[in-house]
Amino acid sequence: RIIPVPHGALRAYVGAPGKVALVVGGGSGHYPAFLGYVGPGLADGAVAGDVFASPSTSAVAGVARAADLGGGVILGFG
């Protein structure tokens, strides 16, 4: 289960404190494919841009802050 947040989504459960979070994302194209990568054993969050556009820096920062568990955040973009 995922939780929608502005410009993206997060995992519904809280991970271990101090875990490094993985946030993926990119332009949406015809559909927000990166949201499908959020789940157990996968990404902790995803950020999506508008159709055929990359997400804004404020959208990336907002999702990264929301996904942070204290161990930092790795950003992966396609």
Image: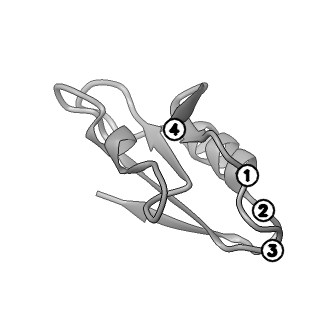
Tell me, yes or no, whether the two marked residues, 1 and 3, touch with CB atoms within 8 Å: no
Tell me, yes or no, whether the two marked residues, 3 and 4, touch with CB atoms within 8 Å: no
> Residue 47, image x and y in percent?
48, 41
Distance between mark 2 and mark 1 Cα atoms:
8 Å
Residue at far left of view: 30
The quarter of the displayed image where residue 17 is located:
bottom right
Q: Residues within 10 Å of mark 1 (few under 14, many from 20)?
A: few
Q: Amino acid at mark 3?
A: Gly
Q: Residues within 10 Å of mark 4 (few under 14, many from 20)?
A: some
Q: Which residue is mark 1?
A: 14
Q: Which residue is mark 4?
A: 56
Q: Amino acid at mark 2?
A: Leu
Q: Nearer the viewer, residue 19 or 62?
A: 19
Distance between mark 4 and mark 2 Cα atoms:
22 Å
Tell me, yes or no, whether the two marked residues, 2 and 1, touch with CB atoms within 8 Å: yes
Foreground disc of the pair 3, 4:
3
Which of the marked residues, 2 or 1, is nearer the chain's N terminus? 1
Give SS at disc 4.
loop
> Residue 38, image x and y in percent?
44, 48
Tell me, yes or no, whether the two marked residues, 2 and 3, touch with CB atoms within 8 Å: yes
Q: Which residue is mark 2?
A: 69
Q: Residue at x 74, y 50 (%)?
A: 65
Q: Amino acid at mark 1?
A: Val
